[in-house]
Amino acid sequence: MDRDVQAAIEGARHAGFDADSLAELRETIAASEPPPAGDGEFTHLWSGNLAIVDAFLRVSSQWRVVACSAGGAIMPVGGMISPTVAIYISLDYAAVRAGLDAEGITVTPELWRGIRIMESAAAAMLNEAG
């Protein structure tokens, strides 16, 4: 099994995919054309993920964020405010639902799982960048 495919399966397992979903993912990957070779930049989106990516992007501004600084809270240090960093907690699910409803997007269990997977990956990247 290709290392990237194995990593995708492990990531799905870590994200809580059940055995049936993991089997379906393996079948989908096996039946898919490999993405074109690239320079490490995003080059391909599987058509089965298009609705999920579209829904996520439409509500991707709806994060619950807290600000932290040295010591875990915003506090003065030597008369100055410590530099703060944003910590992305999760999407605000009430705002996400309102946004998806406003866009006319029907939330299915499959769509919701996909949004949650993208949320987890995005939060990890956003928090790493901070």
Image (cartoon, rainbow, N blue to C red):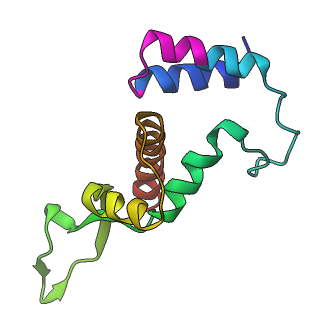
Is 16 colored magenta in this rendering?
A: yes
Above or below, 93 relative to 108: below
Q: Give the residue drawn at x 43%, y 21%.
A: 17
Q: Give the residue drawn at x 88%, y 39%.
A: 37
The answer to whether 20 appears left or right of 79 in the picture is right
If the image is split into quadrants, where does the C terminus sit? bottom left
Q: Position of residue 36 (x, y in %)?
A: 88, 39
Instruction: Give the residue furthest to the bottom.
Output: 79
Q: Quadrant of residue 95?
A: bottom left
Q: Position of residue 47 (x, y in %)?
A: 72, 40
Above or below, 126 relative to 18: below
Q: Position of residue 72 (x, y in %)?
A: 16, 61
The answer to whether 31 appears left or right of 80 in the picture is right
Q: Position of residue 46 (x, y in %)?
A: 72, 38
Above or below, 29 relative to 80: above
- The magenta stretch is 15-24
Q: Quadrant of residue 83?
A: bottom left
The answer to whether 47 appears left or right of 17 in the picture is right
If the image is split into quadrants, where does the N terminus sit? top right
